Amino acid sequence: MILHGYWRSGTSYRTRIALNLKGLSYDLVGVDLRTGAQRSGDYLALNPQGLVPALVTDGGDVLSQSPAILEWLEETFPQPALLPSDPVARAQVRAMAAVVGCDIHPLNNLRVLKAVKAIGADDAATQGWIAQWIVSGFDALEAMVAKQGRGWCYADTPTLADCYLIPQIYSARRFNVDLSAYPNLLAIETRAQAHPAFAAAHPDRQPDAG
Ligand SMILES: N[C@@H](CCC(=O)N[C@@H](CS)C(=O)NCC(=O)O)C(=O)O
């Protein structure tokens, strides 16, 4: 498989974690978001939305949208499972993933931050915008993990929710958001740092980092 992504992109990072947790091997192709490579003709031929990631499967199919890629991975490579078997538990894990995937990340994406600046926000206002959505999502996640987690977001093994959370914590640190109110989320970050699948997916360890 070939993963087209960018080292610091949260959606690429979450996809790398899921691939690693499944024990799958893949090649990485860097798409440099700083130079606008996501809007090049070659990349748009893979993903007409001009966003990373895109995954080319062993069968040559091209998949985009990280939630769809992660669900495809779970369906195609069921072990180790990243969703519990019970339908209610599955919905609870997906809900935690969606706090990040639907309600934090999209509001802080590069193109959205450019749009926020274009309507007049200065650096301080943009920073406030970023922090607002992370804090609102993390407030909820902290409570959800306190109730449902036993070492990871849900119970005692990594799930899709952890694949979403860890890159969002990385992004929060990058934007200097105060995380002291989230001891449960920080405990998961510490656990992930020691987990080979998460550690290998870290942005600093990617060939296009820098
Ligand atoms: N919902 C999409 C979002 C993808 C996305 O926003 N990717 C970002 C990087 S994390 C991107 O390519 N940004 C480029 C841009 O905004 O121009 C997914 O989960 O795959």
Image: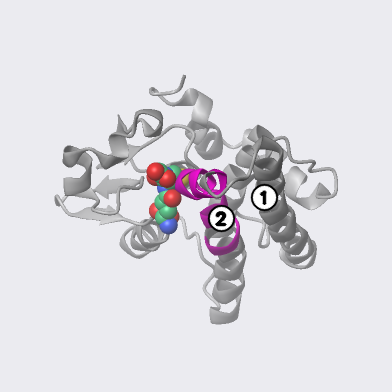
Q: Quadrant of residue 49?
A: bottom left
Look at the image and tell me in which quarter the N terminus lies. top left
Q: Looking at numbered disc 1 in the image, what kind of residue is underneath it?
A: Trp
Does the magenta run of residues contain 111?
yes
What residue is shown at x 72% (from left), y 35% (from top)? Answer: 176
Mark 1 is surrounded, within 10 Å at the Cα level, by few (under 14), some (14 to 19) or many (20 or more) other residues, namely some
Residue 173 position, x and y percent, is 68, 36
Residue 191 position, x and y percent, is 69, 41
Q: How many marks?
A: 2
Give the mark, 1 or 2, whose residue is nearer the N terminus: 2
Q: In this view, does 152 lie above or below 1?
A: below
Q: Looking at numbered disc 2 in the image, what kind of residue is underneath it?
A: Leu
> Which span is picked out in magenta?
102-117
Residue 127 position, x and y percent, is 68, 41
Please give the residue where the numbered disc 1 appears in the rendered image. Answer: 129
Please give the residue where the numbered disc 2 appears in the rendered image. Answer: 107
Q: Is residue 153 above or below residue 118?
A: below
User: The residue tagged with tag 2: helix, strand or loop?
Assistant: helix
Q: Quadrant of residue 32?
A: top left
